[in-house]
Structures are given as C-alpha cells and as structure tokens.
Amino acid sequence: MVTRRRMIGAALATGGGVLLVRTTLRPAASAASTTAAGQDAGHAHPAGAAAPDPGPDAGPSLVEKFTTTLPLPPVLSPVATDNGADTYAVTMLRSFARILPGHRTEVLTYNGAFPGPVIRARSGRPVIVRQTNLLDDPVSVHLHGCAVPVDSDGGPMNLLDAGATRTYTYPNDQPHASLWFHDHAHHLESEHVYRGLAGTYLLTDATEAALPLPSGRYDLPIALRDARFDPSGNLVYRMDDAAGRATILANGRPWPKVDVAARRYRIRLLNSSNLRFFSLRLADGGPITQIGSDGGLLERPHTTDTIDLSPGERADVVIDFSRYRPGTSVVLTNSMPPGPAEHIGQVLRFDVGRPAPDPSAVPDRLRTLPPLGPVARERTIVLKVEEGTAGAAPRGLIDGRQYDPARVDASVAFGTSEIWTVVNANTDIPHNFHLHLVQFRVLQRNGETPGPEEAGLKDTVRLMPGESVRLQAAFDSYRGRYPYHCHLLDHSAMGMMAQMEIT
C-alpha cells in the first residue's frame, strides 16, 4: 500500500519534484508537431531546441483564492437517438476561456467548452460521436477506460487530420464507470491535453442506478489539474514543468469555492494533470468515504482521510457535510509537491449552507466484481525514463525500448487472462501505468496486498520510484493492437509507450 508519507517522502527526496527529467527539450515530433496555440512563451519549440524560461507562474498573483465559483461542465445532448444509439456531434476548436478574473485565455476545446463537456451514457446502449477537427494539428480522441473496437480507441497513430471528421463508436458493453476522453496524438498529447483537450464520460448501469447514492445536483464531477500562466493570463506550456505550474484548477477555475448544502454529496474526482500527483484531504482531517475508482464502484465503501491520485486516475467519494454547522468553510488540501505550499497545498473550498433533504445513503455493499479467471501467462513490464546526455532529449522506455508503432511488444491470446508485473526502474522519478481496452485488478503492490482504494477495477495505477504492482486483466472484448504506457503524458510523449496485439 502506498502511504501518504511514502508518496510525499519520495517526491521530497528527489528534490521536491514529481517529474524529475531535468531538461526543457521537446521530444522529437512529427512534421505536424506545431500546435495552434500561438507564439506565447509556452508555444511548442522545434525538436532539440530548448524552450526559454517562462519565469514564475503569474497565476497566483492574478487571482484571489476562493473567490470564483466552481463551474459544472456542460452536459452534451445527443443530436440523434434513433436505432438504439445516442449520436453526438463534437467539434475541436480554439476558443477563449475566462479562467483568471479579467483575462481571456486561449485554449483548445471540445465544442468550445473549458473544461471539456460531459457525455452521459448507459451500459448496453451505444454512443456514436462525430468528431470534427478544426485545429491546425492532427488529433486522436481516446476514451480512457472504455472497451472499444481498435478503430475507435484513439490510439497514438490513429490520427484525425486537421479539417477532417471521424465517427467514433462506443458500444458501452461494460459496467458503469466514471471515464474521461482526451487527445492521444503521439508527441502532441501532452500539450494538447494541457491546453484543454479533455472531457468527461459518465457511464451508468442498473446496478449503480439502484443504489441510494447522492444524485442530481448532489453528484459533482470535478476535474483537477495544474497550470502556469504569464502576466497576461495566457497558458504557458513547456515539457517537464511540474514544479513551475503553481496554479491549481478545479473544473477549469483557480482555487474555486463550492457552495454545498449540509448533506451528503457524491464527488467524482479526476486527476487530469499531465504530471502532477495529488494527495487530497479535508483541512480538518474529516472523513471521506471512497465508493469507487477508475472502473466504477468498489465492492464495499471504505472511510479514509486521504485520496491519492496520479495523472489519469479517478476516485468516486462521498462527503457528508451535515457534520458541519451552516456557515462553516472547509478547504480541500493537497500535500504532494512540487511547488510552493501556499499555492499547490490548497485545491478548493467547500462553503456549507443550510441542511437540505437527504434521502441518500451509502450501502455497506455496492456491487459484486467478476471473479478472477485462470491465468494463461505472466509478464514483467519495466518503465524507465533515461535522461539525455550532451543536449539530447530524454527517452521514455518500456522494457528498454521507445515506442515504435510498427512493433508488437506483447502478443496476447484473445479470451485469456494474464498477470502483468509492472516495475518502475527509476529510483528518483515516479510513473504510472495505463492499459487501453481493459479494466484490471491490482493483486499486489510491492509484494503486499493493496489497500482498499485499489480493490476495485482499475485502468491506471501509480508507481512511485522503485515500486512494482502486480495486476490481472482479461482480454476478452476486442481483438487488435492497443497501446499501454505511462500516463504522465510527458513520459508517453517521450516514447514510454508500447503495443499489445490481441489475436
């Protein structure tokens, strides 16, 4: 089990940085690697050219904490609901968002929304999304955590060119889960997601709907991330900038306040950062009931005071604000470096109002997970960032090799279950691990039984320096080539990605 102290200690021991690739070099990119985000200090630089130092993050000086209100992302409405499917039309385009008071910030968006919109789906009912790319770059839309045919997976080389339209089909032939979608175009994904190409996909089913969990206005999706701004309020991007991004955003707003009634709320937390790890707790140490993770509800809820999330991970929690008197405020804090504690140590503030009727409850039993099947094969997967020498860019490696889309790194028999032991070979750099197509079970962490927060279905798992996790996945949904990679997006952009073929 990764304890809070161990996570913080690992970061501090390596100089206070979560990502410790000490370079500002952009990885080698395709010919279409220039973004459409303008020529500001954070604009992409040619391969091998160092980005100029953008200076300190101006965001904290441009906003007073807890003065803006947490927005809820817009929920998309289908353009058609015939033939047993819901069809959506989504356009990727540049837009402007009012992230910091008094400033307009250029962002990359789905349908002009920052943060990205929400698609609500039901198990067993397909969703069809017509994506149109009005950006200057190619993109690839990946529905993170969903079992989909390979041509709709949004792999790193399955590109949607500028000006083109593609239809993505999501069968939703899996149980409920809080998923998200984001760009995955190789070498471009890091900057594209940073500038806004991410949205939420909430999949429900009869099992979840039958539970008396908080719902409606009391069910809040909250995407967390960090950012760096220049004095004009523009987003500043450069590789390996975890320490420089001191502005914490929740649903696209810096340090917002959240007005809540004195009752239970369900809060769906997503870490949509490129690099930042979060260790979240209420400032008064109050209880948080975790009910779900990446792949939906846990079998049983568990009460904790801390929620740890690496990039791409989700946690579904319930907080009972009836324990506070009306007029009380409580801050959601973060104890994971890097960055100045007065900024990165605070996330948002809950302002508790009057009691409201609360018919909700958290049952002792939430769901039954499918049994683990017989194991056909075991593998070991080794993650490592190798720092460049003599001005060379760092390399992201899996099993000693950078990503090659023409190479198959793991051949998997369709319909079988495998155990993968994933190892972080770096002693000073954290990683995490994301498998496309499947939700897996974490069997062991560093040879021990994982904690209750990892007892459910997962698609992304964190690995602090030197750690290993043992996981089991069943490959029984679709055939084809799917990637697996570190979901610290700068690492995958550096080549820390590989490919499995399911036949």
Image (tube, rainbow, N blue to C red):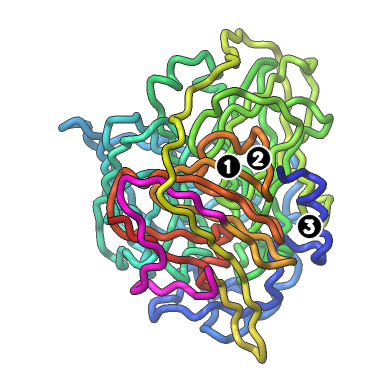
Front residue of 335 and 384: 384
Circle 3 — which element?
A: helix
Q: Is mark 2 in CB contact (under 8 Å) with mark 1?
A: yes
The residue positioned 79% from the left and 20% from the top of the image is 327
Please name the residue that numbered disc 2 is placed on. Answer: 450
Residue 330: percent from left, percent from top? 78, 30
Residue 422: percent from left, percent from top? 57, 57
Residue 356: percent from left, percent from top? 63, 11
The residue positioned 54% from the left and 74% from the top of the image is 400
Q: Is residue 479 above or below residue 228?
A: above
The residue positioned 36% from the left and 72% from the top of the image is 407
Magenta stretch: includes residue 180: no
For marks 2 and 3, give the one nearer the viewer: 2
95 relative to 127 in the view: left or right: right
Q: Earlier in the sequence, mark 3 or mark 1?
A: 3
Give, as a three-letter code, the residue at label 2. Pro
Q: Which mark is residue 10?
A: 3
Circle 2 — which element?
A: loop
Q: Which residues are magenta?
A: 398-421
- In the picture, the quarter occupied by the C terminus is bottom left
Please name the residue that numbered disc 1 is placed on. Answer: 443
